[in-house]
Image: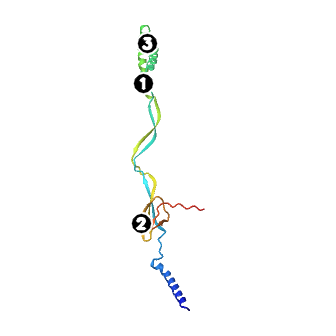
Amino acid sequence: MGKAMIVGVVCGALGLAASGMAPAYGLDEREPEYADVLAVQPVREEGGAPRDACREVEVSRPAEVKDQQQIAGTLIGAVAGGLLGSQVGSGSGKKLAAVAGAVAGGYAGNKIQETLQARNTQTTTETRCDGVAGNGYDYGVVGYDVKYRLGQEVGWVRMDHDPGARIPVRNGRLQLDREEPSPVW
């Protein structure tokens, strides 16, 4: 065996030994590509701000009155009362009874029309809104609190999406944005 060959074998053996020891000394350590997700808790927004609560309501109002003085009721009552009064008595008593019947009938007709007008209503539907305070309704998930482990470090981070089982890491930092899948060509 020549001297060059011995030097080559020794150098090769040292190279193999060094490459086997490199992981033991951390020379081959690479940073992790992912952080492990330990827990995910959805963050929900609850309705706390004032809002309008609206509903449809039936409303009854007095109908529009076209004859405010109840003239029609008074006239019809007076004619009817006069006709009835003229049926009572004879001579000048008949005329007096007709006048008294007309006055009483006019008054009665006026009151009857007034009562009928008060009962006459119109029903419509209106939207009524009331301001109400927060009601505790759940308006949905607004984010996720995520507990993770990166190497020996355990931490919490808020994300806008559920990351699944792990979070990508680049240059020692969590990648919190959604990774878009690369297109397959």
> What whole-number distance in Å separates the C-alpha atoms at marks 3 and 1?
24 Å
Judge by depth and name the residue closer to the eye, 163 or 64: 163
C-alpha span from label 2 to label 1: 81 Å
How packed mark 2 is, by other alpha carbons closer than 10 Å (few <14, some 14-19, many 20 or more), is few
Q: Callout 1: helix, strand or loop?
A: helix
x%, y% of residue 118? 43, 27
Pick the residue in front: 181 or 117.
Answer: 181
Q: Is residue 111 left or right of residue 8?
A: left
Quadrant in which the C terminus is drawn: bottom right
Task: Name above or below for residue 147 compared with residue 25.
Answer: above
Q: Residue furthest bottom?
A: 1
Image height of 96 relative to 12, above or below? above
Q: Residue at x 43, y 26 (%)?
A: 115
Asked if the residue at tag 1 contacts the one at tag 2, i.e. Cβ–Cβ closer than 8 Å, the answer is no
- Label 3, secondary structure: give it: helix
Which residue is tagged 3?
A: 98
Q: Position of residue 176 (x, y in %)?
A: 46, 62
* Amino acid, disc 3: Ala
For marks 3 and 1 on the same chain, the one whose residue lies earlier in the sequence: 3
Q: State the residue position of label 1.
A: 114
* Residues marked 3 and 2 touching at CB (< 8 Å): no
Residue 138 lies, with reference to residue 59, above or below; the image says: below
Q: Amino acid at mark 1?
A: Glu
Along the viewing direction, whichever of 21 and 109 lies nearer the viewer: 21
- CA distance for labels 3 and 2: 105 Å
Which mark, residue 155? 2
| Of the image marks 3 and 2, the number of the one nearer the N terminus | 3
Other residues around mark 3 within 10 Å, as few (<14) / some (14–19) / many (≥20): many
Amino acid identity at mark 2: Gly
Residue 182 position by quadrant: bottom right
Marks 3 and 1: which is nearer the front? 1
Please identify the quarter of the rendering in which residue 154 is found. Answer: bottom left
